[in-house]
Amino acid sequence: LIFLNTEAKNWEKILPFTVAHEFAHSVSEYYGGGDYNLGQGLIFEGLAEHFRETVLGGEPAPFSKAINEKEILNNLEKIKNKMEINDLNLHFEIFFGQGENYPLWAGYTIGYYLVGKYLEDKKDVDWKVLLRKNPTDILKEVLK
């Protein structure tokens, strides 16, 4: 489901980007409606936003660039031992900045960064395959 806030500024312009991003989630057999661990969540979000950029272009979304590379690496260090935890409160902390431990949208930015690293040496990305790949395998490859 996608809920539209037609009162939001530029909602008509943003809608195709949102649909592309959410479509990327919907085709993964691993995206269990929020039933996934932190590491998988990071990869899901990174894949969805890189897919959106590939098919529609445009600038990176604000949530993909919410923190700089130094902050990304510092926060990655803080969460590296939490990648296999499936906890909605932890997800809200890292992705939405609830609490005082992580900046707003840090999870989205970290996921975008990790998938960007994963894609760096890939020449021809087959999104039909990549969006269906196990996110845990992607995470392991990029964090080795």
Image (spheres, rainbow, N blue to C red):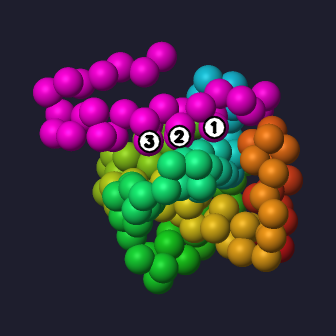
Q: Which residue is mark 3?
A: 17
Mark closer to the chain start, 3 or 1 = 3
Query: Can you say whether 113 is above or below 44 in the image?
Result: below
Q: Position of residue 17 (x, y in %)?
A: 44, 41
Q: Residues within 10 Å of mark 2 (few under 14, many from 20)?
A: many
Query: Can you say whether 29 is above or below 124 in the image?
Result: above
Q: Give the Cα separation between the discs numbered 3 and 1.
A: 11 Å
Q: Mark 1: which amino acid? A: Ala
Q: Residue at x 72, y 74 (%)?
A: 120
Element under label 1? helix
Q: Give the Cα separation between the discs numbered 1 and 2.
A: 5 Å
Element under label 2? helix
Q: Residue at x 14, y 27 (%)?
A: 7
Q: Are marks 1 and 2 in contact (CB under 8 Å)?
A: yes
On residue 83, which mark appears?
none
On residue 24, which mark appears?
1
Q: Is residue 25 magenta?
A: yes
Stretch in magenta: 1-30
Viewer can see residue 87: yes
Nearer to the camera, 44 or 8 = 8
Q: Which residue is mark 2?
A: 21
Q: Are marks 3 and 1 in contact (CB under 8 Å)?
A: no
Q: Which residue is most to the bottom?
A: 70
Nearer to the camera, 87 or 24 = 24
Q: Position of residue 87 (x, y in %)?
A: 58, 36
Mark in the foreground, 3 or 1: 3
